[in-house]
Image (spheres, coloured by chain):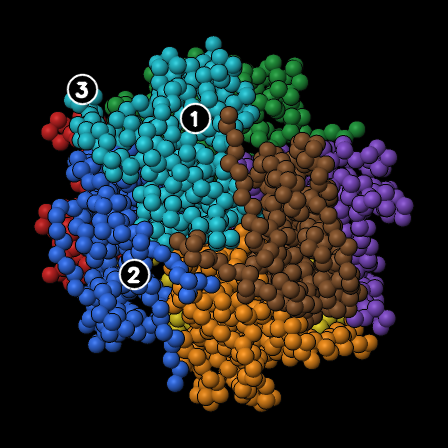
Chain colours: A blue, B green, C red, D cyan, E orange, F yellow, G purple, H brown
Amino acid sequence: MTHFPAIIMDEQRRARTGVEEAVLCEQKTVDQIGDIIRMSQAENIRRLYTRLSFEKFDAIPAPQRDLLRYRRDACIAVQGEVADIPGPPQTAIVSGGSSDAPVALEVQETLAFHGHSSLLIQDVGVAGLWRLLERVKDIAAMPVVIAVAGMDAALPTVLSGLIPSIVIGVPSSTGYGAARGGETALNAMLASCSPGLTVTNIDNGYGAACAAMRALNMLNNTPATAAKLDKIRITNQETAY
Amino acid sequence: MTHFPAIIMDEQRRARTGVEEAVLCEQKTVDQIGDIIRMSQAENIRRLYTRLSFEKFDAIPAPQRDLLRYRRDACIAVQGEVADIPGPPQTAIVSGGSSDAPVALEVQETLAFHGHSSLLIQDVGVAGLWRLLERVKDIAAMPVVIAVAGMDAALPTVLSGLIPSIVIGVPSSTGYGAARGGETALNAMLASCSPGLTVTNIDNGYGAACAAMRALNMLNNTPATAAKLDKIRITNQETAY
Amino acid sequence: MTHFPAIIMDEQRRARTGVEEAVLCEQKTVDQIGDIIRMSQAENIRRLYTRLSFEKFDAIPAPQRDLLRYRRDACIAVQGEVADIPGPPQTAIVSGGSSDAPVALEVQETLAFHGHSSLLIQDVGVAGLWRLLERVKDIAAMPVVIAVAGMDAALPTVLSGLIPSIVIGVPSSTGYGAARGGETALNAMLASCSPGLTVTNIDNGYGAACAAMRALNMLNNTPATAAKLDKIRITNQETAY
Amino acid sequence: MTHFPAIIMDEQRRARTGVEEAVLCEQKTVDQIGDIIRMSQAENIRRLYTRLSFEKFDAIPAPQRDLLRYRRDACIAVQGEVADIPGPPQTAIVSGGSSDAPVALEVQETLAFHGHSSLLIQDVGVAGLWRLLERVKDIAAMPVVIAVAGMDAALPTVLSGLIPSIVIGVPSSTGYGAARGGETALNAMLASCSPGLTVTNIDNGYGAACAAMRALNMLNNTPATAAKLDKIRITNQETAY
Amino acid sequence: MTHFPAIIMDEQRRARTGVEEAVLCEQKTVDQIGDIIRMSQAENIRRLYTRLSFEKFDAIPAPQRDLLRYRRDACIAVQGEVADIPGPPQTAIVSGGSSDAPVALEVQETLAFHGHSSLLIQDVGVAGLWRLLERVKDIAAMPVVIAVAGMDAALPTVLSGLIPSIVIGVPSSTGYGAARGGETALNAMLASCSPGLTVTNIDNGYGAACAAMRALNMLNNTPATAAKLDKIRITNQETAY
Amino acid sequence: MTHFPAIIMDEQRRARTGVEEAVLCEQKTVDQIGDIIRMSQAENIRRLYTRLSFEKFDAIPAPQRDLLRYRRDACIAVQGEVADIPGPPQTAIVSGGSSDAPVALEVQETLAFHGHSSLLIQDVGVAGLWRLLERVKDIAAMPVVIAVAGMDAALPTVLSGLIPSIVIGVPSSTGYGAARGGETALNAMLASCSPGLTVTNIDNGYGAACAAMRALNMLNNTPATAAKLDKIRITNQETAY
Amino acid sequence: MTHFPAIIMDEQRRARTGVEEAVLCEQKTVDQIGDIIRMSQAENIRRLYTRLSFEKFDAIPAPQRDLLRYRRDACIAVQGEVADIPGPPQTAIVSGGSSDAPVALEVQETLAFHGHSSLLIQDVGVAGLWRLLERVKDIAAMPVVIAVAGMDAALPTVLSGLIPSIVIGVPSSTGYGAARGGETALNAMLASCSPGLTVTNIDNGYGAACAAMRALNMLNNTPATAAKLDKIRITNQETAY
Amino acid sequence: MTHFPAIIMDEQRRARTGVEEAVLCEQKTVDQIGDIIRMSQAENIRRLYTRLSFEKFDAIPAPQRDLLRYRRDACIAVQGEVADIPGPPQTAIVSGGSSDAPVALEVQETLAFHGHSSLLIQDVGVAGLWRLLERVKDIAAMPVVIAVAGMDAALPTVLSGLIPSIVIGVPSSTGYGAARGGETALNAMLASCSPGLTVTNIDNGYGAACAAMRALNMLNNTPATAAKLDKIRITNQETAY
């Protein structure tokens, strides 16, 4: 019988960096995803699955599939308990149009998986500037702001010029032709004349949420931060090479 | 003796299209440019020279060079008289930053060469949104608006979302890295979510001015327009192929 | 129950810019599109839907789908009444070949949705120059000309060299290999040696129509234009940030 | 006399966003730069000049040039006083090789200009992994880490996988051929499998420093942060459009 | 009846170069693949088929399909006997994540088809550096190492900086957005600051295995090597052109 | 009823240029293709259809579909009689591998449609140089040679260095990864160090055949050539614009 | 003493292919070029030097430089006698604008070096269509036409649609921005809807002339052609490998 | 006084990997290079400097410059003794044309610096196939072959199809236009249909030599290889993080 080599998840990552590894499902087969679900269940590990398409989700065998809470509008799934989220949000998620919703929701779900609430403000693209200006005060109240935008991606530039928060831009693949699947949005954010904007990969809501959590961990002085110098010892004598 | 083949200028173009052909100097040699100046002088033709670098201008022999009025801050030159410009401006030229000045000035000089005045508003990039908002009323009063911007080029998107004018975007090569010599600005304008924005080549102030003049000729119902159906007869029997 | 956040349409846009916002369906889900139809019906709003594929249209639930008039040859749909179009056309739509038809028809439908008639001339690509030359006189009679072309996109260059009208080039994704999905057509139009040609995104018939309408609004001095300075006040004291 | 339109600096930016606008000298002429120095002197404004080449610096007239403190190894200049920097550093600047020095130093000088000290660790590229591992403990002690790397840019990936800090990657243009002037480093950082890494434009040390300062302002709860909601009121009734 | 021209396989290749030609199925039709299987059966030739998708494999007529041993997790098939592999492995195959498995397995199967065993180590991407460091000793014991990695592809750089073996990098198409289907991994490997790393095409596990076998043939002084000067005589008098 | 505007075929093209216009089916709908078949039947016009996929061909209504002779291995179809081809071939079609067959066959069918026979030599890629060398004598006997090759496309370079014939290179989209859908083959042919090689678009067998026929028409002094000066008169007084 | 390895010129090429190898000077050092001139002088060989910049030409030591006839307007040089050119031209060289002159002249000089006269028609770009139409009759009289054009490169498309000759397009690097150094012209020619147009590398006048001469050799049945089967024997028994 | 941070050379690299780190001078300043020379002299370390341009070399202060042996035809320099090279060569360096000489010589010098002799065969590009075929026997006698080629880079494909040696391709930046500074050569090598060819970065002669030496170290079972498992211990308890 041909069977797949065991998949090694990187369970030490949260201890070292403060964020959990997610399972990027895009290039994995249904068999691989099913294996990970089963192993996680056996070891009682919570797990986040990103870029899990409808087709793949529906093809997972029912015993494993039923262990997931799947959000069809964001192609994201959670395995295991989701704790109540305490306290008011510290992160605003702002997006340009309704086509950006899957990315914005990937941010929101990733934050929620790690216990962070967020404020979601959609459809405020700058082609209709008045929509953004009505919400700037709410946005500026958050120490971390994630701005999702496709096409020309002018939103993060305008927004980061108005507020002092940490601003993370997420280019989305919305648009066609010269939008080039998100490359134009990506380049526009990188070339932005508004200083202090940093950027993630196209459609990478998960990565933006992780960056936000690094900042929140520093801001909140979480135990993960306090303990970091002891926990991230890489090698001991036995395993040193 | 090796001598260069005579250069054939396209003198019929204004009659047909309403705009004069300019001499694009970028890939021409100093010898070629000098020849054009001399021939134009001999035939008493006004002429506009674009993208004429300092080095080339200084290398033109004095008898020809003295026939040019050269604008060093825009690498543009005019040969022949420039008439007084009557009436108030119908075109606004808006730019994001002072590095865009050469392009904005190429627009202005091209319009002036053809007898059109313009309103020039610089340094209103949307990273500092308040600078633009203070001038929107003046801009919206013009039927034609040319917006020059580099880097992320968010300016034309924001502007065209606010006003009903004809808006022509000119991406500039300002910026570095992901700005890619103006390609990002170009793509951002093309992918703009603000409908009805059209775009020219990178740094092509001359082309944007020509597009503006096509619109103004239509708006003003100039003689060129009225007479166009008669003038643009391409072939007559003798020259027909 | 998971439900999608409400979609905020930008209803103020026509008041400010003279053109209606369209619903770009390409990256929206069927659920999102259905929601927009239902909300528009509830609020009695006319709506234009672009890039709506056969598959998505057929998947819309019948109650909503029946509210649309869908044009299968252009992947475009209209919700609500279409008024009779008064007067002769002021816009020519010219295309290179029959593969460009969907784009040319998107232009035509967008104009019609806003109450503008147009003259449609297809299959006049310059590889068979005689086809174009027989129609130049009709084309030159229009103040605004939209030229749709793919592959090498030589049509707008040749055409704009012959006529004084406002000429807007729309590169189409027709072709294969070095046509690169419309990029070559786009670049050829941008680099055109025919001055005063402006360009939209690849396949963006909607955008070209909006640009045409900006020009027509200026030419026709429509009420939207006359009233623009009062209507586009962005902020008042209460909503200012 | 032809004279250049006055340059409008955006003096309100620090009040709104917590970071000063810098003068990007790359596409400005020597005349423009000289004008800015003179105006800043007249108005007693401190100023940071980035990407100011040797040639341009040497061409600035002496009265203006003498007002600058120029750092030749980073093509950066400061006009005005630099205050003493209090307290220990909160930011680590880590770079792969000595060719990355100009970018790393642009980060350091930008931070210093705004009153932030930093810890600079160079030449720890991961091709010689032992060099980095010896310094990880020092790096992890900082809440903000800026990692500068060219070529394959593996450094930020390895580093952000080891520490919980905020990590900002700056791709440098070091390398040749497939390094493509920094594009490969940029894409490698964006595509990094290490979650929570955000990225700036190629060689954009200034931007990374600004992003770091946004985070430090949030961490330190600086007055700029506390007062932000009042200061960033965009419009008042008089200037509202 | 339309029938396909006979396909000419290059049976002399192993004699000359030491490696067998494989059948690259990606752009071949099912009919072509079926013809090759039948002809190979008729002539009793062993054959390796790469990039043979599920759909194509399932569409091959049963008589031919049953002659293949197909590995679904690597889209690779073998026709004919596979001999026992003698001796310990001389090649390590190292990959960054489980999404790289198909490429890593293509390497392994190609080596096995030619009679070489290998050591397969998966899921040791450098975002979790400890995973690699625990296995470096095993990897360094092999004279040839093939490192498969996608996204930012930092693995081969880190690895080749640690060991003296021949290191061949195989960029994989794992990732999305800025990963650009493997181009970023490819460029990162080419631009690596770790000297002596060579690279194959994206996802080209077969090619990497062939390169490894060229090295092993040299190392092991196989008969193919000893006899090479006699066997690879290209032309004799009769067939000379 | 919505009906499609009539498609205007360019029936004058053969008279002017010596080659027939083909129907490029790739971006046409099944409805459009069916219309062209019906119109051609009505007007008794022979017609060549290229890049007609299986799916589209099968979807054409039977009455029209039955009028086509379809070649499934080349996605090409002929409507109307095919005359016997007199005389020996003057064109060699040479290809690198069996994956290039569809392109090579498109060349062959296009030539046959116009009455030219050809010599087809497949599977002679230069990775197995002996295969080509055995056939060079046959190839060199033809005045026109069309070389189809994908991947690295070394075949046309090697071949054109050996023979004096007219050599036309057709890059094919065979390969993956760095082959970039034929772009690498295209660029390699364009950059070839073998002088006098000209190139067509990727996979453009039709275009290469047309170029060959232009040459053959000149070589054979066909009636089309003799009569060309009279036939290609573009305009007469009535239709002149 | 360090001395350069002898340069091996490929003197057999004309015998085999009918065209002489030229010396491409672009990436050669002045020392290398001087060596080639001296060796050619010693062996009494005529030689063509292309892409020889002013700077390099002027830096060649006088004894060698004086052996060249240099054409400064085309960066081309000839060493040795140039025979009188008998008979009327068979090749037309057509270019779009005066910036294309260096490429057009490289074509002309290469033809002349091999003993072919040509008809040079410049400045007939299709933005002013009337200029081309006046000359079509002269152009169509030539069996071979070389069309040089930059920017959007519409000239070869329009021209090849009008005439039955062999048409070879040479994209030039004229233009800026979206012209991309000739890539847009190249792609536009490759994607041309005018069938039977073949293309050379950007600015490759030499290559286009060589392709023209291959055609002329076939047309004129020159001795080189007649003798080709005997002359191009690659190997004999002694040198066979 | 502003002084540059000390440059940390990676002196442990040879112990771990068997190859010395070279100083890549391209993006270093003359000051940095001078510092490295001085420090190396002080510590009595031999050093290789690559991509050291004429201008930079001439600008190094004489005391440091005199410590270098500079090879102007390869932009490479050596500091320190070069030992006699024992034994016959094991590596062939093969290049397509004389423009590739600087890269081929960088390979040769790097090998010599490490004590390896080599066989250099230049000017055997496959456009003149006979030149290569005469030398194949000599090339095939070497266990390692480095093939340098630009433009279409067909040489490595043809060569690796003929011989069983380890073949490393080095794309060179020779050529213009579609050669794209070596990218076409790079892609052609990567997409080669000749299996087992691996590739380095464009113009990276140093890297190819290092790869060759990794193979030679394995073949020759050098002390470095034998001792590798003990020497490359990365961390000990004291420095472990």
Q: Is residue H13 in view from this perspective? A: yes
In this view, B115 is above or below C125? above
Q: Which residue is mark 1?
A: D49
Q: Is residue G170 in view from this perspective? A: no
**Residue type highlighted by circle 2:** Ala
Q: Which residue is mark 2?
A: A22
Classify residue H108 as left or right of residue H178.
Answer: right
Q: Chain of mark 1?
A: D
Respond whether the residues carrying marks 1 and 3 are from the same subunit.
Answer: yes
3D distance between C-alphas at marks 1 and 3: 34 Å
Q: Quadrant of the C terminus of chain D?
A: top left
In this view, C113 is above or below C55? above
3D distance between C-alphas at marks 2 and 1: 42 Å
Residue A147, image x, y percentages: 27, 44
Please tell me which residue is depicted at 69% across the width and 36% down the height of the picture.
H65
Q: Nearer the viewer, mark 1 or mark 3?
A: 1
Please tell me which residue is depicted at 89% across the width and 48% down the height of the picture.
G43
Q: Which residue is mark 3?
A: D238
Q: Quadrant of residue F192?
A: bottom right
Q: Chain of mark 2?
A: A
Please tell me which residue is depicted at 56% across the width and 40% down the height of the picture.
H27
Q: Nearer the viewer, mark 3 or mark 2?
A: 2
**Residue type highlighted by circle 1:** Tyr
Q: Quadrant of residue E45?
A: bottom right
Q: Residues within 10 Å of mark 1 (few under 14, many from 20)?
A: many
Q: Residues within 10 Å of mark 3 (few under 14, many from 20)?
A: few
